[in-house]
Image (spheres, rainbow, N blue to C red):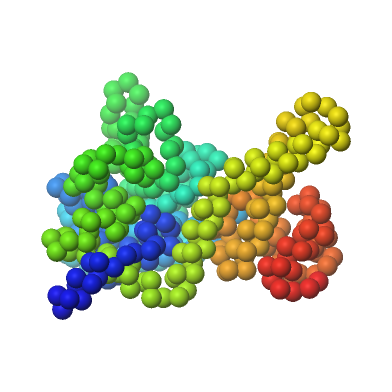
């Protein structure tokens, strides 16, 4: 048994839980509820003050029929039972109910009075603040069923793990907590605890000095960005991190899981290199345009055109690939490769692919029909 544990300690985890697929498969499991509870207590600083003692996972797949296309899934929605509610819940035999409003498939324990949404954002959103506010409003709107009192409105906690720097003017702080309060008195008054939005900039955390990273309250962040750190591979490693490593190593024996993680990492890598790619394409096109037009500004204009066209072409290819790999439209939109309307048009075409609909798609995407035809036939191995 000791040999097996030692072997697990020395094994290398390939897919880090700072990415969506690994994170969900690690924390959104009944067997690992204790890990999620520990993570949440650390993030929300509940460990010593009214800690979370149990969580109820909610059904997070929200169908497009329920929201407009701009609305995404609520990534890791969990309902939290706080310690001071436990006796009351047991005494009143609280039932688990289904929200009937708009038939939303969300399951919750009504007396917990707190809902937490966890989201991982790898790519910088068009407006992260408004995006988070939009998701928050969706959670609030659907947290009461018809006929419920406003007194039953749960407390909302939104946790955003960011792979980029949102607060670019402050490099010394990576953990942010926003709530509703009066500008002058700085007090929340009746809004106390009703809404908290957290941003955790993992990109800044990774640049901290090693000693600061090892701060006890930051260890889960360290595990997310470096699960192979020596701290998690020792005989004295806390059991919760041993459990987490064993889960991730076990997941890596699943072929489908590995394929999903590989594709996710490729998309991320492609996104990171995208600006450099666009710049190179733009320079080449700029030189051509400059020569043809015989003007000095041709290169600059061409670079801009090349950037746009290079990004558009890359986006179309990747969206086709993601649909082929059965990614949901919400996940595809999260990567912001194309406008939401363009992703919907591609989905519409794929529901009924034929030459005429391909021509219509080419017009709407403002791309050559021949190029689009080649992309489709290459990705799906089908001739139109």
Q: Which quadrant would the N terminus be assigned to in this image?
A: bottom left
* Quadrant hosting residue 287: top right
Q: Residue at x 71, y 68 (%)?
A: 378
- Give the left or right position of residue 339, taking residue 254 as reference: right
Q: Residue 31 in the image: x percent, y percent? A: 27, 71
Say above or below: 14 vs 187. Answer: below
Say above or below: 303 vs 8. Answer: above
Q: Residue 106 in the image: x percent, y percent? A: 42, 63
Q: Residue at x 59, y 63 (%)?
A: 322
- Considering every residue shown, the one lying at the far top of the view is 184
What is the number of callouts on the image?
A: 0
Q: Residue at x 38, y 63 (%)?
A: 14
Q: Nearer the viewer, residue 334 or 190?
A: 334
Q: Residue 177 in the image: x percent, y percent? A: 33, 38
Q: Residue 216 in the image: x percent, y percent? A: 18, 47
Residue 54 visible here: no
Q: Nearer the viewer, residue 311 or 347?
A: 311
Q: Nearer the viewer, residue 352 or 94?
A: 352
* Quadrant hosting residue 26: bottom left
Q: Residue at x 83, y 34 (%)?
A: 291
- Give the left or right position of residue 257, taking residue 381 as reference: left
Q: Which quadrant would the C terminus be assigned to in this image?
A: bottom right
Residue 218 visible here: yes
- Give the left or right position of residue 241, taking residue 64 as reference: left
Q: Nearer the viewer, residue 322 or 352?
A: 322
């Amino acid at each position: 048994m000791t040999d097996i544990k030692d072997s697990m300690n020395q094994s290398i985890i390939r897919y880090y839980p700072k990415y969506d697929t690994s994170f969900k498969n690690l924390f959104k499991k009944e067997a690992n509820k204790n890990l999620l509870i520990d993570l949440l207590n650390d993030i929300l600083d509940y460990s010593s003050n009214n800690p979370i003692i149990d969580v109820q996972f909610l059904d997070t797949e929200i169908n497009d029929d329920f929201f407009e296309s701009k609305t995404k899934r609520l990534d890791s929605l969990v309902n939290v039972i706080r310690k001071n509610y436990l006796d009351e819940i047991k005494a009143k035999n609280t039932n688990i109910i289904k929200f009937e409003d708009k038939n939303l498939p969300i399951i919750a324990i009504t007396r917990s009075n707190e809902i937490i949404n966890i989201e991982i954002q790898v790519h910088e959103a068009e407006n992260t603040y408004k995006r988070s506010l939009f998701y928050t409003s969706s959670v609030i709107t659907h947290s009461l069923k018809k006929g419920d009192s406003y007194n039953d409105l749960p407390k909302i906690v939104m946790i955003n793990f960011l792979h980029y720097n949102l607060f670019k003017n402050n490099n010394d702080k990576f953990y942010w907590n926003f709530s509703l309060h009066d500008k002058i008195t700085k007090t929340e008054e009746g809004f106390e605890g009703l809404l908290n939005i957290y941003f955790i900039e993992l990109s800044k955390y990774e640049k901290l000095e090693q000693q600061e990273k090892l701060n006890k309250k930051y260890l889960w962040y360290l595990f997310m960005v470096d699960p192979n750190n020596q701290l998690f591979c020792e005989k004295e490693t806390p059991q919760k991190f041993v459990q987490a490593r064993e889960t991730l190593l076990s997941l890596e024996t699943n072929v489908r899981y590995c394929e999903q993680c590989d594709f996710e990492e490729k998309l991320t890598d492609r996104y990171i290199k995208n600006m450099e790619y666009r710049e190179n394409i733009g320079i080449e096109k700029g030189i051509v345009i400059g020569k043809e037009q015989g003007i000095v500004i041709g290169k600059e204009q061409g670079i801009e055109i090349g950037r746009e066209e290079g990004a558009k072409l890359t986006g179309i290819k990747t969206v086709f690939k993601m649909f082929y790999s059965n990614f949901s439209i919400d996940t595809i939109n999260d990567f912001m490769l194309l406008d939401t309307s363009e992703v919907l048009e591609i989905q519409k075409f794929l529901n009924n692919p034929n030459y005429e609909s391909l021509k219509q798609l080419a017009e709407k995407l403002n791309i050559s029909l021949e190029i689009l035809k080649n992309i489709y036939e290459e990705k799906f191995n089908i001739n139109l």
